[in-house]
Amino acid sequence: MRRAFIYGNDITPERIERYLPGNYQVVGNGKDIDGRDFVLIEGEDNAGWTMDDYVLPRLASGLWFGEEIDEH
């Protein structure tokens, strides 16, 4: 399972959900310790629909940028 915090102006879970392929979903939202709004996404890479090659670049096209959570 891969997870990332997504940041950007006018960010809402509904807006981010529209940019995600079926193997990724919005699982939360809130504010970080610096007061920035974020949306948390998670999913499994599948058949080219990957975090690095599809999800984060597609979100960047809407001026939302991700920080993957390293769970190791």
Image: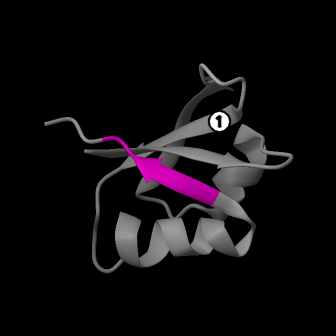
Name the residue at the top extreme.
33
Q: Quadrant of the N terminus?
A: top left
- Place of residue 24 in the rendered image (x, y in percent of width and height, measured from the top left): 45, 53
Q: Is residue 26 above or below residue 43?
A: above
Give SS at disc 1: strand
* Display colour scheme: one colour
Image point (54%, 74%), residue name: 57
Q: Is residue 50 visible?
A: no
Q: Is residue 42 visible?
A: yes
User: Which quadrant would residue 60 be assigned to in this image?
Assistant: bottom right
Amino acid type, label 1: Phe
Image point (69%, 75%), residue name: 61
| Side of 5 relative to 23 (left or right) | right
| Side of 63 relative to 46 (left or right) | right
- Place of residue 63 in the rendered image (x, y in percent of width and height, measured from the top left): 74, 65
User: Which quadrant would residue 48 be assigned to in this image?
Assistant: bottom left
What crowding class fits label 1: few (fewer than 14 Cα within 10 Å), some (14-19), or many (20 or more)? many
**Residue on which the image places disc 1:** 38
Q: Quadrant of the C terminus?
A: top left
Name the residue at the left extreme.
72
- Place of residue 69 in the rendered image (x, y in percent of width and height, measured from the top left): 34, 41
Please identify the dominant SS of the magenta region: strand
Q: Is residue 35 above or below residue 2?
A: above
Task: Depth check: give the residue in front, 58 or 72.
Answer: 72
| Side of 32 relative to 22 (left or right) | right
Name the residue at the right extreme.
10
Q: Is residue 39 above or below residue 33?
A: below
Image point (38%, 64%), residue name: 51
- Place of residue 22 in the rendered image (x, y in percent of width and height, measured from the top left): 48, 60
Tell me which segment is drawn in magenta: 65-69
